[in-house]
Amino acid sequence: MAWLKTVLLILVLTIIGACSQNHPSNAGKDKLEAGIRDLMLDFTQEVDIPGMGFGYYSDTVGTVMVAVGKSDKEHDVPLTVNTHYPIQSTSKMFISILTLQLIEENKLLLESTMDEWTADVPNGKQIAIRNLLNHTSGLNGYFENREFMDAYYSDTGRKYSRNDLIHAGLELPYSAEDFGKFKYSNTNYLLLANIIESITGQSIGQVLEQRIFNPAGMDETYYKPDLPADTTSILTCYRDGEAVDLEKANFASNAAGGIISTLGDMFKFAHWVMENGYENRMTSDLIFNFAAEDITFSAGLGIEVIDSLYGTELMGHSGGNPGLISEFYFSVETGEIFIFFINEGNPRVNYPLRGKLDSILQSYR
């Protein structure tokens, strides 16, 4: 029996060793979390913003989520890692994945042109699904229609439909010279949403839930414009210290930015994207956008690629409304995930947040 005890001892030691390799020490993780928290507290106090949430994942550290400050100043509600927040334009990644899924199912083609779906889009014989996905359609966004936006924000009683927003963008003069050039426009993704609903016979919220939220295990995520009533507490967004009307400021973007989520669920989304290789399909058609401060930014099919942020190539999408700034990026090369949001749309100081975060993380990467 001595040999059996020896075998069992070796097995136990092997399991313990494997666990110690796969799960970083709590002390190291706690130290990292404390360093990040201190930096975030300095940031929120120096820039005078209500609160901030930050999340980081790596194979060596695991998942770290930190939240500081207030979700709602007026009612003294603390911002926590479970606070729901509008991911805004990061929603475009979700719409892109839905579109690519339908293409893979032979229900749609990247080269399908707008005249096949609607007669309202100028240059419809040339503008294809690909152009909508990578913002090279040349179509104007409704935010550029100042007359519409003034009416939108002043008329608090009217409910605007997705088609209202599309029409506001399309009624602006179209320049054929913009076709094929990068021109960011929410109108592109609102048109995609209409096409997705036409193909599936379901609302965008239903399609998102069935095709992304449920498969990715995102139990705390939903598409707000589909809900006539919302009982979920969402963080309050501020502009120059004043609370903004979230219904107007955020959900104007509809399918181009109407998803509500949490830090934890956005981690699930990042892992799901990488596990299923969606980033490969979304970056198959990269176009050059611009280079600034030694960082090259490229646009793909509903995804952004930044070549040297945090010392590695990152993929994902940023988002924001007049009272919110957020970023969601992951690295396929290192497996790292970086997420943060700030519930103030106009920080008063250009604070080198990323660089300081990077300096803290370097010791743990």
Image (tube, helix red, strand yellow):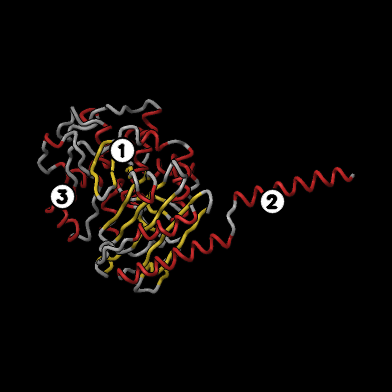
Occupied quadrant, residue 76: bottom left
Q: Which mark is residue 300?
A: 1
Q: In the picture, residue 24 is in which quadrant?
A: bottom right
- Residue at which label 2 appears: 16
| Label 1 residue SS | loop
- For residue 235, side relative to residue 214 (left or right): left
Under mark 1, the amino acid is Gly
Q: Observer-nearest residue: 63 or 320?
A: 63
Front of the two marks 3 and 2 = 2
First in sequence, mark 3 or 1: give its number: 3
**Mark 3 and mark 1: span between their CA atoms?**
23 Å
Q: Earlier in the sequence, mark 2 or mark 1?
A: 2
| Residue 107 versus residue 218 in the image, above or below | above
Asked whether residue 245 is in view, the answer is no
Q: Residue at x 37, y 67 (%)?
A: 51
Q: CA distance from mark 3 to mark 2?
A: 59 Å
What number is the disc on residue 144? 3
Q: Could you tell me the amino acid type at mark 3?
A: Glu
Crowding near pointer 1: few (<14 within 10 Å), some, many (20+)? many
Left or right: 182 as drawn, with respect to 171: right
State the image quarter where residue 11 is shown. top right
The amino acid at mark 2 is Ile
For the residue pair 177 and 246, the one nearer the viewer reads as: 177
